[in-house]
Image: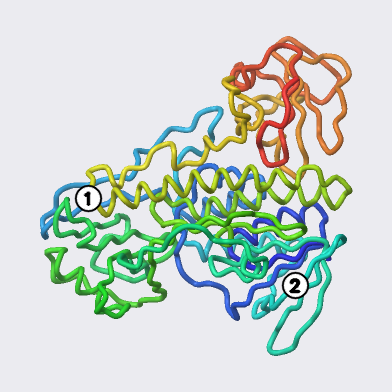
Amino acid sequence: MQVLIAGAGPTGLTLAIDLARRGVPVRLVDQAAEFFAGSRGDGIQPRTLEVFDDLGVLDEVLAAGAPTPVMRAYLGGEFVGERRMAEPVAPTPAVPYPNLWTLGQSRTEAILRDRLAEFGVRVETGTALVSFEQDDSGVTAVLDRDGVRQTVRAAYLVGADGGRSTVRKTLGIPFEGSTDESLRMLLGDVRADALDHTYGYWFAAAADRPMEGIALSPLPGGKHFQVAAPLTEDAEAGLDVLQDYVDRHSGRTDVVLTDLTWITVWRPNIRLARAFRAGRVFLAGDAAHAHPPTGGQGMNTGIQDAYNLGWKLALALDGDESLLDSYESERRAVAARVLGLSTELLDKLVEGDEDAMARGEDTRQLDISYRAPGDHRALAVGDRAPDAPVKDADGQPVRLFDLFRGPHATLLCFGATGPLPTEPGARSYAVLRPGSTTTEPHVIDVDGHAFTAYAAAEGEHVLVRPDGYLGRRS
């Protein structure tokens, strides 16, 4: 085993898939005896859909999920209209998946587990990481399963084990931030068969008092809604308190909540680990950053932590450790930004701002960049690599994302008609305008979208990292 991952949520699963498809021996353990069964992080952002495209699970996620629903708003029991968090955006050549996608987290995890199993790796449930020590060559960890302890050895350990992370606590890394004990929210999954399941519902006392109400959002693949409502100090988390909110604010008597399959009490816990790495041990996902659910950022940020780290660990195991430090420098800055965004949206919700439910481009995570400060080019090193429709050597329509898909880097050589340069770990392609030819691997930019998206000149080379960001322009 070369990598041990503690925590089999979306972050741990994504990392395990990315490593396994690279042929890296990986072990994924989770202390829970059973898989999580609830919706929790049910919003999948456009950038995460691109990650899922590369990992080979996008078709299953799209088939199982649904677009963000229209919300029917009721204030003081009166219907006041329909609202969307964001108007649907049409796909473009550069952005094929521009909209938020809805799918309960447990279903997303099941799809990821099935994909991981295709590589011969399965989640080890009921297996807790008890302790670990590291030295210059690896990590020695103690695992506990049903009271039986096992000592294992790995080159690297990744803690994707949530906000109460054993890995982070063992390392002694501070989890800096705050927890607001004055605000408690209920999140859960219920049925409300009197409501049209194709819509979401917001039942509130008044527009300027949004916290005095309840929201229900339909979950794809069944009859359940994800429900969110405040919990007062003297109330018990359960179906009765949710039903009371519906009775008081819906203006209806026929809406009966049933089949509460999952519920949790959430407090605004806004925290960021001071470090994401200590030697051969890394933190990812909720173990590294805790978010409010506003904006649907937490799960997506964790998935992209894993996507950033996987190829760098694989390089290190192949003898090149030069990029391992860039995991923390790149992802911690992103987490800090996302925490700020989520907190701002939470504040708007609590204060009853008119645009509290509005979501813009800043939540889609397509604009996340690792570019150097002061680099003001339209598309710089560190930016997301755009997609573009092209045609292959046989004249068949393909996309740049088709060239990128897989564990390799990709070298795009714009206008190159001669022999292509080679790059370790990369596949090279010429990107040609119509009328140009070459015997080398190439695509034809029939409509000019690739040259435009990359602001590329004839003779320019662009290296796209395995995680879909620009690594070099020359």
Q: Identify residue type, mark 2.
A: Phe
Q: At 86% across and 15% down in the image, what residue appears?
A: 418
Q: Is residue 399 left or right of residue 183?
A: right
Which image quadrant for residue 438?
top right
Looking at the picture, does residue 462 appear above or below residue 49?
Answer: above
Foreground: disc 1 or disc 2: 2
Nearer to me, 385 or 378: 378
Percent x, y of residue 22:
80, 51
Instruction: Give the labeled residue for mark 2.
Output: 132
Q: Is residue 387 left or right of residue 37?
A: right
Q: Identify residue type, mark 1.
A: Gly
Percent x, y of residue 89:
41, 35
Label 1, secondary structure: give it: loop
Q: At 59% across and 42% down in the image, what residue appears?
A: 50
Label 2, secondary structure: give it: strand
Q: Quadrant of the C terminus?
A: top right
Q: At 33% across and 59% down in the image, what residue appears?
A: 217
Nearer to me, 23 or 232: 232
Which image quadrant for residue 329?
top right
Looking at the picture, does residue 316 appear above or below residue 98?
Answer: below
Percent x, y of residue 252:
13, 66
Instruction: Give the labeled residue for mark 1.
Output: 352
Q: At 84% across and 38% down in the image, what residue appears?
A: 425
Assess disc 1: are there few (<14), some (14-19) or many (≥20) residues with their C-alpha within 10 Å of its C-alpha: some
Q: Which mark is residue 387?
A: none
Q: What whole-number distance in Å separates the C-alpha atoms at marks 1 and 2? A: 46 Å
